[in-house]
Image: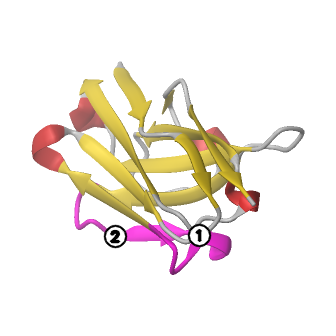
């Protein structure tokens, strides 16, 4: 089992920045990919960004490219999401997720472990 705990959400004005953290514990060596998803009210959960522990290759949804950066600290078993130039449409609950699969997937259904989520609200 892998336990994931997110932190760093909050209220910010448009154009501002936030950094989310996801601390992993348990059998963290079993996870090949860590990712961030988000879910806005009335919408489905969507992929935001992912990073492979091995090689640190990263993936982003088009709407956040150039604004968000995902990174990982293997020694701390922690993944970060630096969010800059935030927009009101970035408002959502952000979830951290871990996938044991060898290949990185952007699909929600591929991820085995999830955190409880952290609220990000961007005011206009």
Does 40 sit above or below residue 81?
above
Density class for disc 1 (Cα within 10 Å; few <14, some 14-19, many ≥20) is some
Q: Between disc 1 and disc 2, whose residue precedes? A: 1
In this view, the mark in front (1 or 2): 1
Name the residue located 50 percent from the left edge and 40 percent from the top edge: 9
Density class for disc 2 (Cα within 10 Å; few <14, some 14-19, many ≥20) is few
Q: Is residue 37 left or right of residue 70?
A: right
Which span of residues is magenta-colored? 53-68
Specify the quadrant of the image occupied by residue 44: top right
Residue furthest to the left: 75
Q: Position of residue 75 (x, y in %)?
A: 10, 44
What element does badge 1 sit on? Answer: loop
Front residue of 35/68: it is 68
Name the residue located 89 percent from the left edge and 39 percent from the top edge: 42
User: Residue 57 has which mark?
Assistant: 2
Q: For mark 1, what is the residue?
A: 15
Q: Quadrant of the N terminus?
A: top left
CB atoms at circles 1 and 2 under 8 Å apart?
A: no
Q: Position of residue 26 (x, y in %)?
A: 25, 21
Q: Position of residue 78 (x, y in %)?
A: 26, 42
Name the residue located 27 percent from the left edge and 65 percent from the top edge: 56
Q: Quadrant of the C terminus?
A: bottom right
Specify the quadrant of the image occupied by residue 69: bottom left
Q: Position of residue 16 (x, y in %)?
A: 53, 64
Does 107 sit above or below residue 49?
above
Front residue of 93/79: it is 93
């Amino acid at each position: 089992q892998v336990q994931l705990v997110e932190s760093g959400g909050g209220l910010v004005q448009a154009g501002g920045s936030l950094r989310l953290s996801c601390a992993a514990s348990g059998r963290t060596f079993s996870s090949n990919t860590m990712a961030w998803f988000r879910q806005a009210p009335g919408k489905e959960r969507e992929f935001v960004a992912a990073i492979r522990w091995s090689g640190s290759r990263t993936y982003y949804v088009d709407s956040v490219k150039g604004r968000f950066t995902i990174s990982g600290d293997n020694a701390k078993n922690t993944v970060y999401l630096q969010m800059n130039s935030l927009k009101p449409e970035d408002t959502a609950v952000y979830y951290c997720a871990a996938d044991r699969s060898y290949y990185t997937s952007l699909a929600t259904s591929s991820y085995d472990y999830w955190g409880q989520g952290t609220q990000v609200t961007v005011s206009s």
